[in-house]
């Protein structure tokens, strides 16, 4: 007969407490994605939605979930917005997973996240992972440039984003690990029009960045690529190098559709390669506009064609050389 009150019995080991993970989501009018995104994040008891004053039901839907709190801030640039969140939001847990509203976390990725943040033998302060981009009912595996590695799991005090208006890369203060599992990216879940609108805005910001890069040295970017050990630094240098290439639109299409075998992704691969190439073309045109402003020249030409008198020239300062005559030239297809 066992004596359950015996003092000689060995004590039961104390229950091990597992660390949790906070989640950060940046939103602006994401009502179509909000519910499904949050359902795949139900494993976190601390989800922070940083909302840029949505005008739809984004916040209303988010507040239906008991593990969600909302912080509101006007959007300025992606890097400033994200850095503000890392510096001012008090997360419940030391680890944060960043997710866009049009992304879905798989159970396998959830389990891997919880495993690595609770593994005391790992000393990384951030982790990068891949994603599967969905378009026209299929995963764009080839022409979509898979795999693209991005940092999504991190300690918020060990990471800051570089000061760029678009496509800002994170700077990590410590070692970087890799996750094996993927998240699913439904980038066209709201339809095609929002994608075009977003990338039109992105192309404007990219053009401004390209003009800045083009004032620098091509050899500097080549040197950075040759000696870079950090993948993100190398990727940024390759991006900068691409601004020096002529006909970037055509080069991007050939790279995606032929070299990276986007043709094997069927119609989805063709359309996706064409859309990304068009985005590159927008950047090229906007760079040309910034480098060679044509508004004043077009105005002068229009006045000449309409027979309007030209605006009187401003008197030159004393001692200044006489200006050379302006030769107007009509541009076909402008």
Image (tube, grey):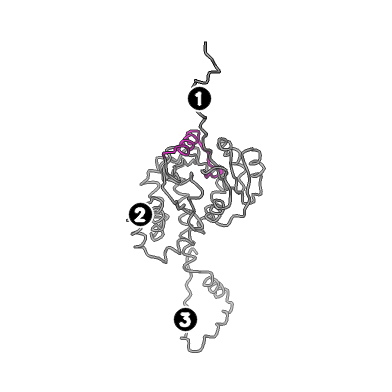
The number of numbered badges drawn on the structure is: 3
Identify the residue position indicated by label 2 in the image. Answer: 228
Q: CB atoms at circles 3 and 1 under 8 Å apart?
A: no
Question: Can you tell which of label 3 and label 1 is closer to the viewer?
Answer: 1
Which mark is first along the chain, 1 or 3? 1
Counting residues from the start of the chain, the first of labels 2 and 1 encountered is 1
Q: Which residue is mark 1?
A: 11
Alpha-carbon span between mark 3 and mark 2 = 49 Å
**Where does label 3 land, which residue?**
325
Rendered view: 67 above or below 221: above
Q: Secondary structure at mark 3?
A: loop
Whether residue 102 is in magenta: the answer is yes
Res. 8 in view: yes
Residue 21 position, x and y percent, is: 53, 40
Gap between marks 2 and 1 measured at Cα: 54 Å
Does 318 sit above or below residue 73? below
Closer-to-camera residue (161/296): 161
**Crowdedness near tag 1: few (<14), some (14–19) or many (≥20) residues, C-alpha within 10 Å:** few
Residues at marks 3 and 2 touching, judged by CB atoms closer than 8 Å? no
Q: Position of residue 235 (x, y in %)?
A: 40, 52
Span shown in magenta: 97-121
């Amino acid at each position: 007969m066992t004596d359950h009150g015996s003092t000689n019995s060995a004590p039961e080991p104390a229950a091990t407490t597992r660390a949790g993970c906070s989640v950060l989501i940046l939103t602006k009018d994401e009502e179509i994605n909000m519910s499904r995104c949050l359902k795949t994040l139900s494993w976190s008891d601390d989800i922070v939605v940083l909302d840029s004053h949505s005008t739809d039901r984004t916040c209303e839907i988010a507040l239906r979930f008991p593990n969600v709190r909302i912080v509101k801030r006007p959007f300025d640039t992606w890097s400033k917005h994200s850095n503000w969140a890392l510096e001012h939001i008090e997360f419940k847990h030391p680890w944060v997973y960043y997710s866009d509203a049009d992304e879905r976390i798989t159970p396998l990725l959830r389990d891997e996240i919880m495993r690595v943040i609770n593994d005391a033998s790992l000393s990384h302060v951030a982790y990068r992972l891949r994603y599967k981009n969905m378009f026209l009912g299929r995963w764009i595996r080839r022409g979509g440039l898979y795999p693209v590695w991005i940092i999504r799991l991190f300690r918020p005090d060990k990471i800051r984003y570089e000061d760029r208006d678009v496509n800002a890369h994170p700077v990590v203060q410590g070692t970087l690990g890799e996750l094996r599992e993927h998240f699913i990216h439904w980038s066209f879940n709201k339809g095609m029009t929002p994608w075009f609108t977003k990338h039109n805005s992105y192309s404007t910001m990219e053009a401004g960045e390209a003009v800045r890069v083009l004032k620098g040295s091509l050899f500097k970017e080549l040197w950075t690529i040759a000696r870079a050990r950090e993948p993100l630094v190398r990727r940024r240098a390759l991006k900068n190098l691409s601004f020096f290439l002529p006909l970037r639109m055509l080069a991007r299409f050939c790279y995606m559709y032929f070299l990276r075998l986007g043709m094997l992704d069927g119609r989805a691969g063709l359309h996706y390669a064409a859309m990304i190439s068009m985005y590159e073309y927008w950047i090229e045109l906007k760079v040309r506009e910034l480098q060679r402003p044509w508004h004043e020249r077009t105005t002068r030409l229009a006045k000449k064609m309409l027979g309007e008198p030209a605006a009187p020239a401003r008197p030159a300062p004393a001692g200044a050389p006489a200006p050379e005559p302006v030769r107007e030239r009509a541009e076909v297809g402008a």
